[in-house]
Image (cartoon, rainbow, N blue to C red):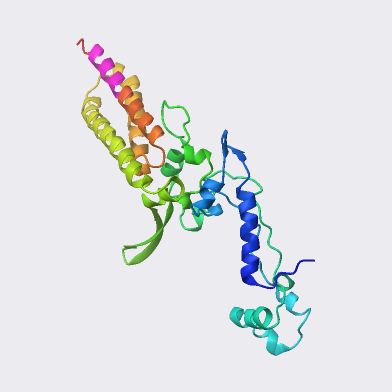
């Protein structure tokens, strides 16, 4: 039986195991992912995968009783530094003689949005979730973001802590920055593509927003026979516009879907105008 008596050696063994796991080709989201590329960049497994370890290596107090029954030892049960110094440094006790076993490996992927967002937030991300999954819009087919299909966790990008003070209360959130893209896609990727996505979506949004504002004034004066169909088109266009606005990433979460929503909103408004023009005899 192999007994590892060094934290450093143990870490190396676990690291080698991770390399072996990461090197495997895994069929996911319709394609093969070669994990060495991300491993070389230092991307943490948990950025995309959940359940990398089944549980933490806890130490139950009952395990102490297998060797000790002196009260002075048991009283220091919570003194982690003392326990490691006495057991590991001085007496070379094997880690798992005290700790529960840690099971490593990836037993499957879970839906990206079924992560642990609610540990910090309470249902605050509906629009962002729908945008990332490519759902929720009017007249546009489902169009999941490529990173959603690859099961990339929100925390892979939202990794930078920020505190906000609101009405005397401090709210801690994790925000995303363009630099987070570089971890997986290479240096400079974020600073090139994030501004490009956002600029394109914001320009398109401004055009459709102006058209919607113009339609709002017209809708208030339309005739009853025109009201039903025109209002329906107007509401659908407004819904798509508001979804893009509420998401707030301006394309970063899902540039393709955001663009398609705005294109469809523009189409709805143009159709509504055509109905009104025909109804007025123009």
* 144 vs 84, nearest the viewer: 84
79 is higher (above) or lower (below) than 215: below
Q: Tell me the quadrant of the picture where the N terminus can be found.
A: bottom right
Q: Residue drawn 24% across and 27% down? A: 215
Q: Quadrant of residue 16?
A: bottom right
* 219 vs 134, nearest the viewer: 134
105 is higher (above) or lower (below) than 209: below
Q: Quadrant of residue 82?
A: bottom right
Q: Main secondary structure of the magenta part?
A: helix
**x, y percentage for residue 228?**
34, 21
* 143 vs 35, nearest the viewer: 35
Q: Is residue 270 magenta?
A: yes
Q: Is residue 124 magenta?
A: no
Q: Is residue 114 visible?
A: no
Q: Quadrant of residue 28?
A: top right
219 is higher (above) or lower (below) than 156: above
Q: Residue drawn 38% across and 29% down? A: 260
Residue sitting at the far top: 281
72 is higher (above) or lower (below) than 202: below
Q: Is residue 16 visible?
A: yes
**x, y percentage for residue 64?**
73, 78
Q: Residue drawn 36% across and 65% down? A: 170
Q: Which residues are magenta?
A: 269-279
The answer to whether 265 appears left or right of 117 in the picture is left
* 248 vs 191, nearest the viewer: 191
Q: Tell me the quadrant of the picture where the C terminus can be found.
A: top left
**x, y percentage for residue 97?**
74, 72
The answer to whether 137 appears left or right of 92 in the picture is left
The answer to whether 233 appears left or right of 149 in the picture is left
């Amino acid at each position: 039986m192999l007994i590892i008596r060094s934290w450093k050696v143990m870490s190396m063994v676990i690291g080698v195991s991770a390399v072996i796991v990461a090197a495997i080709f895994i069929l996911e989201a319709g394609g093969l992912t070669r994990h060495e590329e991300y491993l070389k960049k230092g991307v943490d497994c948990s950025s995309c995968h959940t359940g990398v370890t089944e549980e933490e290596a806890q130490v139950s107090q009952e395990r102490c009783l297998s060797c000790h029954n002196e009260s002075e030892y048991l009283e220091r049960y919570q003194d982690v530094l003392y326990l490691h110094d006495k057991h590991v440094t001085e007496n070379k006790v094997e880690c798992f003689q005290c700790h529960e076993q840690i099971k490593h490996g990836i037993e499957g992927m879970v839906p990206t949005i079924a992560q642990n967002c609610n540990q910090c937030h309470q249902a605050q991300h509906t629009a962002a979730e729908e945008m990332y999954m490519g759902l929720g819009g009017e007249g546009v087919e489902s169009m999941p973001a490529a990173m959603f299909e690859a099961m990339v966790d929100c925390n892979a990008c939202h990794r930078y802590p920020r505190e906000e003070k609101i009405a005397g209360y401090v709210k801690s959130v994790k925000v995303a920055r363009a630099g987070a893209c570089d971890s997986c896609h290479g240096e400079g990727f974020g600073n090139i593509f994030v501004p490009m996505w956002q600029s394109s979506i914001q320009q398109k949004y401004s055009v459709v927003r102006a058209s919607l504002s113009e339609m709002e004034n017209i809708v208030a004066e339309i005739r009853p026979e025109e009201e039903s169909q025109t209002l329906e088109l107007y509401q659908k266009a407004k819904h798509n516009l508001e979804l893009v606005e509420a998401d707030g990433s301006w394309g970063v979460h899902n540039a393709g879907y955001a663009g398609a929503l705005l294109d469809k909103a523009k189409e709805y408004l143009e159709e509504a105008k055509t109905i009104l023009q025909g109804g007025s005899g123009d």
